[in-house]
Image: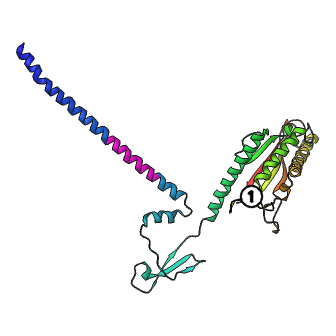
Amino acid sequence: MASLARARRRRTPDLEEGESYYVSMTDMMVGVIFIFIIMLSYFALQYRQSTKALTQARHPETAALLQTATALTPHEATVEVDDKARVLCVPEDLIGGTGSDRRCFSYAPPAKTAATTVAADDAQRMLMGFLDADLRDAGAPLAGDTSGGALSFSADALFERGTANLSAGGRKIAGEVAASLARRLPCLAYGGASSTACPEGEARLALVNVLSQTNLDAFTAEGQQAAALALARSAAFHQALTGAQPVLAALRNGPPDQAASQPLLRVASVGQSQEGASRLGEGQTVSIQFQMAR
């Protein structure tokens, strides 16, 4: 028994030493993992910042080269450029050569079309966001989502039943819509009062269409009356908008002195032939559609 007790006492320091070694290894591994996480986070942040800088740059190739060119120095030289052929020539000695010849490089024109498209999409998205906020704050009964580029209303909320006469509620809605349009459209059109708040180079609208839509039976007299009513309602809503805010009637989609310039706010109607179409004037919608110039 005494020898067994002595053996147990001898193993106790060994066990304590093993546990201490295990704890030290665990601490070291936690430290290594922590350092690895910090390094990974740093490189991920750097990668995200570099990617953002390159993708949002006006000229991504130039932005990429400038990230690697850290010792640019100015030089005075005569540069020859052929704008039509897109060729640029510099003296050879300017770029480390020893001769008197020229070194020529081709270059691509700026991608203006892509930049314009992006600007137009962004401008339309911002416009619809502002209009949606204006009208919802005013309590206007918008129907559907405005992100598709249109403000839609049920014709029943605007007009007296079966007619193109605006109801009292319809006139109120038209006034609220006109006030919002008068605030938002002049910067995106021509012919309105210039504003110092309008950003330079802003995209422009090509068309703001007051559109009435209806289902109809095109082969019946009632269906043809529904088509005529839809057009009359578009015209009536257009007149209500321009009557409430005359500036809307002055806006155009191009400089007024250009022959192709047209009024920005125009009228249209769409009648979809359908069997068993609803009765005259029922289920019609009136929308204001916004189309950006490309």
Residue ID at (62%, 61%): 115
Task: Report whether 18 appears left or right of 4.
Answer: right
Q: Quadrant of the N terminus?
A: top left
Callout 1 environment at 10 Å: few (<14), some (14 to 19), or many (20+)? many
Residue 293, x across and y down, in percent: 72, 59
Q: Answer above or below: position of 246 versus 272.
A: below
Q: Answer above or below: position of 52 versus 5.
A: below
Residue ID at (55%, 64%): 59
Residue 3, x across and y down, in percent: 5, 16
Q: Is the magenta stretch mostly helix, strand or loop?
A: helix
Quarter location, residue 111: bottom right
Residue ID at (31%, 38%): 30
Residue 123, x across and y down, in percent: 68, 54
Residue 212, x across and y down, in percent: 84, 46
* Residue corresponding to mark 1: 187
Q: What's under tag 1, amino acid-wise? A: Cys
Task: Report whether 184 appears left or right of 111.
Answer: right
**Is disc 1 placed on a helix, strand or loop?**
helix
**Span highlighted in magenta in the image:** 32-47
